[in-house]
């Protein structure tokens, strides 16, 4: 039974990817400029009063992170100093 688990997991992942791709294709063929991911985020924003990035992350099952995460958190405390991010790769 243990040897079946990896193949079952792989089958589930492929099925999910196939379903996601089918929805993306249907949206595209219908002339909708939104991807499914963007639609789901916008739906969360619409349905959540005073929606914050934390609610969006929770609804999508993702975490906050990256160089802008500290800036986003600082805006909630009133300290709105955006970090300097180099576009050339130099520090």
Image (cartoon, rainbow, N blue to C red):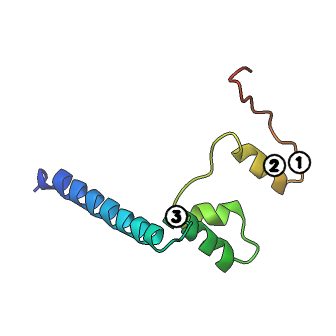
Residue at the image point whose x is 72% and y is 20% from the top = 90
Element type where label 3 sits in the image: loop
Q: Which mark is residue 74?
A: 2
Mark drawn on residue 43: none
The image quadrant that residue 76 belongs to is bottom right
Whichever of callouts 2 and 3 sits on the residue coming sooner in the sequence is 3
Q: Which residue position is annotated with label 1?
A: 79
Mark 3 lies on residue? 35
Q: In which quarter of the image is the N terminus?
A: bottom left
| In the foreground, 46 or 49 | 46
Q: Are marks 2 and 3 in contact (CB under 8 Å)?
A: no
Q: Residue at x 81, y 49 (%)?
A: 74
Q: Mark 2 packing: few (<14 Cα in 10 Å), some, or many (20+)?
A: some
- Judged from this view, the residue extending furthest toward the top is 90
Could you tell me residue 87's position as x and y percent?
72, 30
Circles 3 and 1, Cβ within 8 Å, touching? The answer is no
Image quarter of the C terminus: top right
First along the sequence among labels 3 and 1:
3
Label 3 or label 1, whichever lies nearer to me, is: 3
Q: Residues within 10 Å of mark 1 (few under 14, many from 20)?
A: few
Q: Nearer the viewer, residue 17 or 23?
A: 23
Residue 58 coordinates in the image, percent (x, y): 58, 64
Give the mark nearest the N terminus, 2 or 1.
Answer: 2
For label 3, the crowd category at 10 Å Cα-Cα, with few meaning under 14, some 14 to 19 and many 20 or more, is: few
């Amino acid at each position: 039974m243990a040897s079946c688990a990896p193949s079952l997991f792989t089958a589930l992942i492929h099925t999910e990817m196939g379903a996601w791709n089918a929805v993306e294709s249907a949206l595209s063929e219908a002339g909708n400029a939104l991807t499914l991911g963007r639609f789901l985020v916008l739906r969360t924003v619409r349905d959540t009063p005073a929606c914050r990035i934390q609610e969006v992350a929770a609804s999508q099952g993702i975490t906050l992170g990256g160089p802008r995460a500290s800036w986003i958190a600082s805006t909630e405390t009133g300290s709105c100093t955006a970090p300097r991010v180099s576009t050339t790769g130099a520090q």
